[in-house]
Amino acid sequence: MSASKEAIKQLKVKTGTVTRCLKDLAYTDKEIKSQLERIEKVRQDPEKDEHDVRKQEEVLAEYTTAKPFEQGQLHGYFTALEEKVLEALEDDDLKATEEFSKGVEALNAAAPVLIECGKLEQEDWDATLAQLPAVATPPPPAPA
């Protein structure tokens, strides 16, 4: 049974959505940090008043409000990719593709983010990891 072009395409698309969403979340985190610094600068600036600070805090609120939505999107994309990767385990030709490896890499990158925000349980991720080939499984995290 050869890897179908449609299955490869689906893996590629779903991997891309997870990767893109991870980048969006990283950018949001960067913007939140930057906005916090900006608010502090506005507070320190004698030429700025409380209205200026409030405006900057409104911008920060927009970023912090968007983050849970982005995390929810990532969880949805993650689940769809996880399903495709687990389906691909049944097809040796598909498992041998670069798209499969990239899909597993994307899952490995997204899982800690989702666990940290509470959208994914560690036990669920461990169950998925147990099904993945040993080559694709990351080393266990170092004790905290």
Image: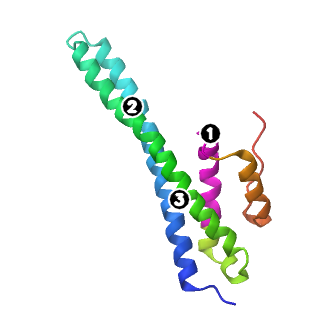
Q: Nearer the viewer, residue 133 or 125?
A: 125
Residue extending farthest left: 47
Q: Circle 3: is it few (<14), some (14-19), or many (20+) Cα within 10 Å? A: many
Residue 59, placed above or below residue 71: above
Q: Which residues are magenta?
A: 103-119
Give me the disc on residue 77: 3
Q: Nearer the viewer, residue 94 or 74?
A: 74
Q: Nearer the viewer, residue 130 or 96?
A: 130
Label 3 to label 2: alpha-carbon separation: 27 Å
Disc 1 to disc 2: CB gap under 8 Å: no
Q: Which residue is mark 1?
A: 116
Q: Position of residue 128 (x, y in %)?
A: 73, 59
Q: Amino acid at mark 1?
A: Glu
Q: In the displayed structure, does residue 105 sit left or right of residue 29?
A: right
Task: Assign the N terminus to one quadrant of the image.
Answer: bottom right
Q: In the displayed structure, does residue 52 sit left or right of residue 27?
A: left
Q: Quadrant of residue 102?
A: bottom right
Please give the name of the residue rendered at 22% of the width and 12% of the height, measured from the top-left corner.
49
Q: Quadrant of residue 11?
A: bottom right
Q: Amino acid at mark 3?
A: Tyr
Check disc 1 and report its element: helix, strand or loop: helix
Q: Position of residue 130 (x, y in %)?
A: 79, 59
Whether residue 108 is in magenta: the answer is yes
Earlier in the chain: of badge 1 and badge 3, it is: 3
Whether residue 19 is in magenta: the answer is no
Label 1 to label 2: alpha-carbon separation: 21 Å
- Report if residue 67 is visible in the image: yes
Label 1 to label 3: alpha-carbon separation: 17 Å
Give me the disc on residue 34: 2
Q: Position of residue 131 (x, y in %)?
A: 77, 64
